[in-house]
Amino acid sequence: NAGVTQTPKFQVLKTGQSMTLQCAQDMNHNSMYWYRQDPGMGLRLIYYSASEGTTDKGEVPNGYNVSRLNKREFSLRLESAAPSQTSVYFCASRRGSTTEAFFGQGTRLTVV
Amino acid sequence: AQSVTQPDIHITVSEGASLELRCNYSYGATPYLFWYVQSPGQGLQLLLKYFSGDTLVQGIKGFEAEFKRSQSSFNLRKPSVHWSDAAEYFCAVAPGGLTGGGNKLTFGTGTQLKVEL
């Protein structure tokens, strides 16, 4: 009963490097989300995908791209990492509008 | 655009005392509302949710919340706090009904709860 799985759990990048954060859910959910969590700022929505084949910007999309690869997987890409992207990243999924979101355990990313 | 305000960044209560965490939302139509809890180093766990019907909803761990449309609020309450309730609490809002709002789910900035023994 895996739920929402994020990889990796920890990552250190140098400024300018690129990387992709992976997220997969095994609950057959339609909607998936990427958030970043910073102290005192709560969870801010980066991108979301209401259903397979669609993606939309959230509150803080600059510097990120996403891919909804299929119904299960939703990846977040940092093309050129910056220290301001140091954060904890959470992936979440929901079956639909009348259900709650389920969260992964997070990816702690440090950009030096 | 939808938004959530949690006015209290930190709250400290004594074990056994009652608790109320405030949440105000901004959304033009019927909202769906949620409270989540996050223990240190962990992901988020759902405490309770409101979609429609009875405005007082019960959740896990003895928590409850009341939806007040006139005040745009969804405050979380617990009659008697336990030391294990120390955590960060997040309120969230999503478009409700058949609005086709794309399922955007927006969180507040959180309230850190400290419990004194």
Image (cartoon, coloured by chain):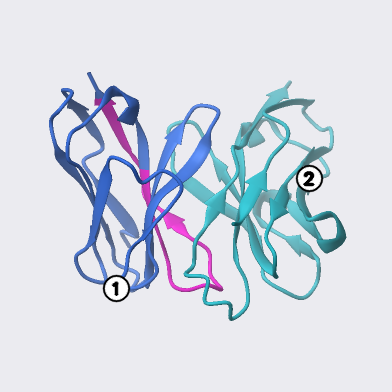
Chain colours: A blue, B cyan
A25 horizontally vs B52: left or right: left
* Magenta residue span: A90-110
Residue at the image position 52 percent from the left and 50 percent from the top = B45
Residue furthest to the right = B70
A32 horizontally vs A18: left or right: right
- How far apart are labels 2 and 1 at the CA level? 39 Å
Question: Residue B59, labelled with which disc?
Answer: none
Question: Residue A52, labelled with which disc?
Answer: 1
Q: Of the residues tagged 2 and 1, which is closer to the observer? A: 1
B40 horizontally vs B29: left or right: left
Tell me if residue A94 is in the magenta stretch.
yes
Look at the picture and state if B83 lies above or below A4.
Answer: above
Is disc 1 on the same chain as disc 2?
A: no
- Front-most of B45 and A58? A58
Chain on which label 1 sits = A
Q: Amino acid at mark 1?
A: Glu
A101 horizontally vs B73: left or right: left
Residue at the image position 76 percent from the left and 36 percent from the top = B81
The quarter of the image holding the C terminus of chain A is top left
